[in-house]
Amino acid sequence: MKLSGDTHEAATRIGLLILGRKRPGFDPEWGALVRKRIGAFLDDAGYHTVVPSENVADDADLRKALAACEQEGVRALLVVQPTISDGRLAPVLSQVWGRPIILWATPEKQTGEMISANSLVGTHAMAATLRHLHRPFHFVWGDPDDRSVREEIDAAVRLCRAYDAVTEAKVGLVGSHAPGFIDFHADPVSLNDTFGLQLYHQGVQDFVDRVNAQAADAVAADAAEFEKLGLPLRGVEREDLLVQSRYYLAMKELTEEEHLAGLAFRCWPDLPNIVGHWPYVALARHVSEGHAVAMEGDVDGALCSVIAENLGIGPVYMTDWLEHDLHTITIWHTGAAPLQLCEPVGGKRGPVVTVQFNNKKPAVVEATIRPDMPVTIFRLWRCDDEYRMTALEGHTVKPRRHLLATNGLVEIDGEHVTEWFDDMLHEGMPHHVCVVPGHRRELLRRFARSLRLGWY
């Protein structure tokens, strides 16, 4: 099973636009040296870089360069001015390139009395123009040899990739939100207006028919593959795994047929009542593999996973906010956490396939989220006709008590949890939140800014 996070973002194809002027200005030798160091930086970083021209100096040059980048499948555009370029290129760039732009300003030569590049000034002017034209951009400042600059470029590339994935996405919904969970209600018009994505809808019975139609040999082979993970069984039989494989394959098939970036489904009361099994082992497998799948009809929750996986910060554990005190949050859900966030398989609190805690039907993954892990808790939602986003950072600690299903305890850094939670309730935050490994608040804030979402 290929786990989420196995891919490397450096494989992203990026375009490098070197903006200049027809007549060399300032210190052309310094500009040439900076250009050479930028190339060495990108080669060392492992990006597949498209360089359509060594000097984009006017409207015709720019349009030709952008067309070449488009033809080469570029998804992130890096714009540099080793020496200041023509500011009139900014509106053309905004008009022709419909995606976010990475603006990288490089430093001055640190010798002599004369300024050598004016790169930051030119980039500042271009950024201001792009902002007034409502074109999203990411700004990087610094020397190509500076390690922090590499980290900033990597982050900007991730942000461009995630923006593309979300604005071109199609997200599926099986059924509707679970009974009473109005905070998960999905509005296809708002999703389109805000993100440009489509919402594909299918009935629960149609999905159940797909589950039941899975070929027996494919189901048996998939169940055997799952058994290789070595999760102990408690209160369930091997035959129950066959049903989970039917669920798993049906979700995969629907996603592939409809080209879905994410999928939400109404898991209760329908699926355990009709099929006789909960789908949570299948769901745990999908989220462990980096697929954006959400329970209880939580479309915006599935979209959170689409964002996280394309930012390269998954896997995503979608959880209830069970309880809290001033500094900690107990995260808990029925049993579908990514396996790589859990205690090790075979350990005392490692993942176990068992029955659902309430009605005792199969099958869920009971586990404890492993301690001593930096994490970010975040959420995207719609309220008052706008989309909003928020995030907290902290680290996992050993839970104070064992809970059935999947649970963990997060200690939050630098935030009064009780006050923060009260504020978020009044902003309409839904009762599911998403947990990802690592401290990712700043990256998520920058993503929200690129789509002009409210940040809280």
Image (tube, rainbow, N blue to C red):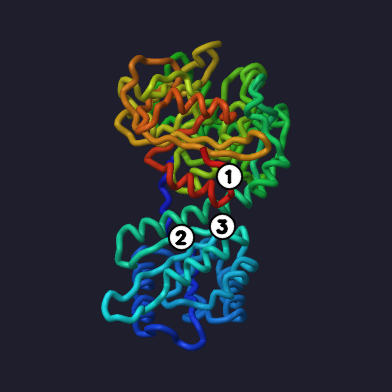
- Say what secondary structure mark 1 lies in: loop
Residue 104: % across, % down: 43, 66
Crowding near pointer 3: few (<14 within 10 Å), some, many (20+)? many
Drawn side of residue 88 relative to residue 378, left or right: right
Residue type at numbered disc 2: Phe
Where, by quadrant of the figure, is residue 80 drawn? Answer: bottom left
Residue at left 56%, top 57%?
136
Mark 3 — residue? 136
Q: Earlier in the sequence, mark 3 or mark 1?
A: 3
Residue 40: % across, % down: 34, 72
Residue at left 37%, top 71%?
38
Residue 133: % across, % down: 62, 61
- Furthest-top residue in this view: 359
Crowding near pointer 1: few (<14 within 10 Å), some, many (20+)? many
Q: CA distance from mark 2 to mark 1?
A: 18 Å
Residue type at numbered disc 3: Pro
Question: Is 49 situated above or below 436?
Answer: below
Question: Is 409 situated above or below 137?
Answer: above
Residue 175: % across, % down: 70, 29
- Say what secondary structure mark 3 lies in: loop
Mark 1 — residue? 453
Mark 2 — residue? 139
Q: Earlier in the sequence, mark 2 or mark 1?
A: 2
Q: CA distance from mark 3 to mark 1?
A: 12 Å
Crowding near pointer 2: few (<14 within 10 Å), some, many (20+)? some
Residue 2 seen in render: no
Residue at left 53%, top 18%?
362
- Say what secondary structure mark 2 lies in: strand
